[in-house]
Every structure is written in C-alpha cells, then in structure tokens.
Image (spheres, coloured by chain):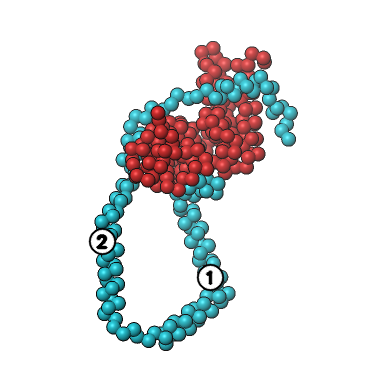
Amino acid sequence: MNPSDAALISQAVAAGDPAAYGELVLRHQSAVRQFLRHLARGDAALADDLAQDTFVQAYRSLAGFRGDSGFRTWLLGIAHNRWRNARRQQRPQLPLDDPRVPEGSVPAAAANSDLRHDLTAALRQLSPDEQTVLHLGYQQGLTHPEIATLLDLPLGTVKTHLTRGKAKLRELLAPWNPNT
Amino acid sequence: MEPEHLIPPSEDDSRLEALLRQPASPLPDHGFTARVLAALPPPRAPRSQARMLAAVAGGLAGLLVALLSLGPTPDLTPDVAMLGQALLALGTLCFDPTVMLAVGVAAGSMVLVLWRNSPLNTPASVRNWF
C-alpha cells in the first residue's frame, strides 16, 4: 500500500529522508507542471523551471506545512506565487500578457477538428482569470474556497469567473451542441 | 445577480462540465524528480549525542573553574545600581515620541522591503499554510 502524503511529509521532515520527498515530487509533479504550463500558455521549459523552483521552495518550507489544505493545493499555491513573481520580474518575456487567439478562429467547425481541440481553443478566448479558475476547478479538482484561497480572490469572484467562463464556452462551442 | 443569458440550461451545463473534467494525460516524469532532488539543499547533519554531551560537559567544567577562581564574592551592589540607572535612562529615551516615530518608520520600511523580496510573498491565506 502506498504511504499517504502526510506519512511521506513526516518522513521527509523528521528523518530528512530525500527519498520520501522524491516520492512526493513524483506523485505531484504532473499536476504542478500542468498548472504552470497552463499559466505559461504552454511554454514547457519555463513551466518546468518554475515547477522545479516550486518543489525546492516547498522542501524548504515543508516543516511548516500544517495540513490546513491538501498537500497538492499547497504546492499549487506556491507554484502560482512563483509564477506571479516571475511575471513581475520578467514581464516582457513572459507570454501571459496577450493570451487571446485571433478573432474568428474559434470554434473550428471544420469536419476534421475534434471537440477537444475546439475546447482548448475556446478556453484561450477566456480571460486569464476565467481560464485559471476553470483549470483549477475542473482539471485540478479544487473546491471553490480552495481556489479563492489559492488565487487570493473573494469566493464570489471565483464563482463569477466560473459562471461567466462556462457561459462563454457554451457560446463558443455552440456548433457542437445538438440542441442548437 | 447574474444576467439572464448567463444562467445555464442544466443539460448543457452537465455536458460542458463533463467535457471540462476530462483529465489531461499525466505528464511523464522524464527525469524531473531527479532534477528536483539534485537541486534540493543538502540535509543538515544531525548532531551526534556524544558531541552534544561533550559540549555540555565542557561548558559546565568551564563554569566550575570560573566560579572557583573568583575567590570571595565581590560586592556588586554599586554596579547593579549604576546599571539600573542606565537602563532607566535608556527606557526614557525610547519612549520619546520622536524616537518611537523613527523606529516605527525604520521597521515599516524593513518589513516592506523584506516582504517584497520574499519568495514566500504569497496571499495571506496561503502564507498561513506554511
């Protein structure tokens, strides 16, 4: 049976066992890297650099992890913070400032495009906050209060981003809806 | 209140949610974990009990030698009185409004600078998790 995150954290902190921390990294690397790739608009190299920073920072702060949230949620909070710091320091190089794809390119209703592709393109039409809230809510499975905490947004704002984001997606993906 | 056009038809909503929930394929590790482990700061070596005992025993021995070499206890009463007066003068100075304002401004500046440069410069709610 696989040890829980809490057991691995205790082992990594109390015994200074790097193997236990390695297991935690292995377990959560995909979620953290995917979140950062989402923030970095697919720039895998930048996302992986920030993900590495995130795990190193988390290791340094591991003894202070109180378990008020899940370990993955805590990691995503650190990752979001690393991303914000990097964007603040190197704004011209980072790709977030104009994430929108050109008008008219979505949805691609051509016969050979699939729904997944159109969804990805439609997501890029949303505002960065709407995209991030949808990513955290649906891809990462975070609750609304967890998203609010992680992004430092009021709960009502998170819910508004979700509602508006989904409304825009429904409109953009209307050609796929058999009821329209 | 949300505009009416944003209120979703429930069937469309569940189909869209199901689509959004479709998990992305997990990213293969491809050596990522190994790179993280290589970048971790080295663990601090635990202090051995023998070294700790030796340090404590040495400290106690030094204290004993110092006490024995003192001889008869000197009268420290005037020195204590002088120290008390000096501390009182220092306390009076610290409660001067100008000094308190200067200390407050300096402390505020330091907090601001350290907070801005801190890697843990996170939202308050996230900071509380540390």
Q: Where is residue B39 in the image (x, y as percent from the top left)?
A: 33, 42
Q: Is residue B109 above or below residue B101?
A: above
Tell me which chain appears red. Answer: A
Name the residue at 56% across, 42% down. A149
Q: Where is residue B83 in the image (x, y as percent from the top left)?
A: 44, 82
Name the residue at 29% across, 63% down. B56
Q: Which amino acid does label 2 sit on?
A: Ala
Give how far apart the Cα atoms at labels 1 and 2 are: 46 Å
Name the residue at 40% across, 28% down. A1
**Residue, far top:** A111
Q: Report the residue marked by disc 2.
A: B54
State how many labels appear: 2
**Label 1 packing within 10 angstroms: few (<14), some (14-19), many (20+):** few
Q: Which mark is residue B102?
A: 1
Viewer-side residue, A76 vs A17: A17
Report in which chain the residue with disc 1 lies: B
Tell me which chain appears cyan. Answer: B
Q: Nearer the viewer, mark 1 or mark 2?
A: 2
Quadrant location, the C terminus of chain A? top right
Name the residue at 69% across, 22% down. B9
Q: Can residue A113 be seen in this view?
A: yes
Q: Which of marks 1 and 2 is nearer the N terminus?
A: 2
